[in-house]
């Protein structure tokens, strides 16, 4: 159960067609913000993204040097190359994660290719200071990808690998996996170009990584300690979220009234559902939330 992207509980809580449409819109918006961050803040400086897009940018630069920039035209072909390289990873997403994740990721990468081709790279950076461009570009890029991840998709490339690893093991995050792999890519950049390009690209990647993990909070676990007399609370948590609940019998030290202590662990996005369940069934329940819980054993990690 823990290795399936969509479990039975996910099927019960599958979003409506309207919510799913909003997710696709969010994916497109995320792709647009990410493309803006790359073409307006990073590309004018001659810096490079990490992951597959970074590889695509390197290929574009080498092609430009080989055949001449004029032969490639005014369109930035990095997005198109990125899409083509992503094809094997699309297959990985389709086979090992889910069809829904595959579809949204396909839309995300396709929109990135379109937006990066349409948004012209300015001859001069938007901001004069290189470090400022790295920070702004990293924040915008992280927000863009964060929106995409929140919609149960990703920006393709290493992000697919990051989500796959997140599903398979504890202690991983999309940003952390990307940072490790990108380190290798930037070492290549230092050899092919110069150390300054690599250093500023790494700064951009670090800011980008922090922004991604900040926006994409779904991999944060929350322990819920609920004290209530209503057994329906745990029944609804198990029914609506498919999460297990451990219970103890207890009593109030002051009143002596019997109550039930319930403990469950959910991810950050499921916490509002727990709050709503408690509010509807027992508004007087005493609840404590512990954020950032590390869980081992049989706990389903959901994207």
Image (spheres, grey):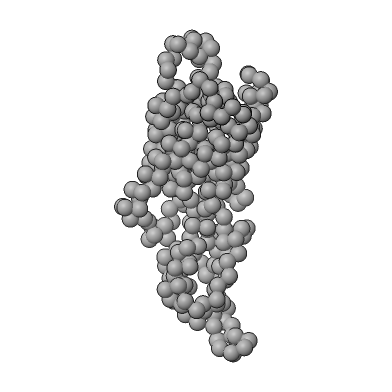
Query: 132 or 266: nearer the eye?
Result: 132
- The spot of residue 54 in percent (x, y) is 54, 28
Residue at 39 percent across and 59 percent down: it is 13
Camera-side residue: 200 or 291? 200
User: Where is residue 150 shown, x and y percent of the image?
Assistant: 47, 49
Residue at x 43% of width, y 76% of height: 281
Residue 125 drawn at (x, y percent): 54, 25
Query: Going by the picture, which residue comes out furthest to the front?
Result: 128
In this view, the residue farthest toward the right is 195
Q: Residue at x 49, y 53 (%)?
A: 302
Whether residue 178 is visible: no
How many dots with numbers?
0
Residue 66 seen in the current view: yes
**Relative height, residue 36 to residue 261 (above, below):** above
Residue 235, picture quadrant: bottom left
Image quadrant where residue 90 sits? top left
Residue occupying image coordinates x 47% and y 24%? 121
- In the image, 94 versus 280, the foreground residue is 280
Q: Position of residue 201 (x, y in %)?
A: 61, 29
* Residue in the foreground of this view, choosing between 38 and 225: 38
> Can you name the residue that lies furthest to the left here?
17
């Amino acid at each position: 159960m823990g290795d399936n992207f969509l479990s039975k509980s996910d099927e019960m809580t599958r979003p409506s067609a309207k919510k799913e449409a909003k997710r696709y819109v969010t994916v497109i918006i995320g792709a647009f913000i990410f493309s803006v961050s790359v073409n307006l803040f990073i590309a004018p400086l001659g810096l490079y993204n990490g992951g597959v897009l970074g590889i695509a940018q390197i290929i574009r630069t080498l092609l430009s040097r080989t055949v001449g920039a004029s032969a490639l035209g005014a369109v930035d072909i990095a997005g198109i190359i990125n899409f083509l390289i992503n094809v094997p990873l699309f297959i990985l997403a389709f086979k090992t994660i889910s069809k829904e994740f595959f579809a949204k990721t396909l839309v995300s990468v396709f929109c990135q290719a379109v937006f990066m081709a349409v948004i012209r790279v300015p001859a001069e950076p938007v901001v004069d200071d290189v470090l400022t461009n790295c920070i702004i570009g990293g924040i915008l890029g992280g927000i863009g990808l964060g929106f995409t991840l929140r919609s149960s998709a990703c920006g393709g490339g290493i992000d697919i690998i990051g989500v796959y690893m997140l599903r398979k093991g504890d202690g991983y995050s999309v940003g952390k996996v990307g940072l490790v792999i990108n380190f290798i890519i930037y070492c290549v950049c230092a050899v092919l170009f110069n150390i300054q390009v690599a250093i500023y690209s790494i700064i951009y990647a670090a800011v980008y990584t922090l922004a991604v993990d900040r926006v994409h909070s779904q991999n944060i676990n929350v322990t819920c300690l609920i004290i209530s007399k209503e057994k329906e609370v745990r029944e609804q948590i198990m029914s609506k979220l498919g999460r297990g609940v451990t219970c103890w019998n207890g009593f109030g030290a002051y009143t002596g009234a019997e109550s039930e202590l319930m403990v469950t662990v959910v991810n950050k996005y499921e916490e509002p559902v727990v709050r709503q369940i408690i509010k509807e069934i027992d508004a007087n329940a005493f609840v404590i939330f512990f954020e950032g819980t590390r869980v081992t054993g049989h706990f389903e990690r959901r994207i």
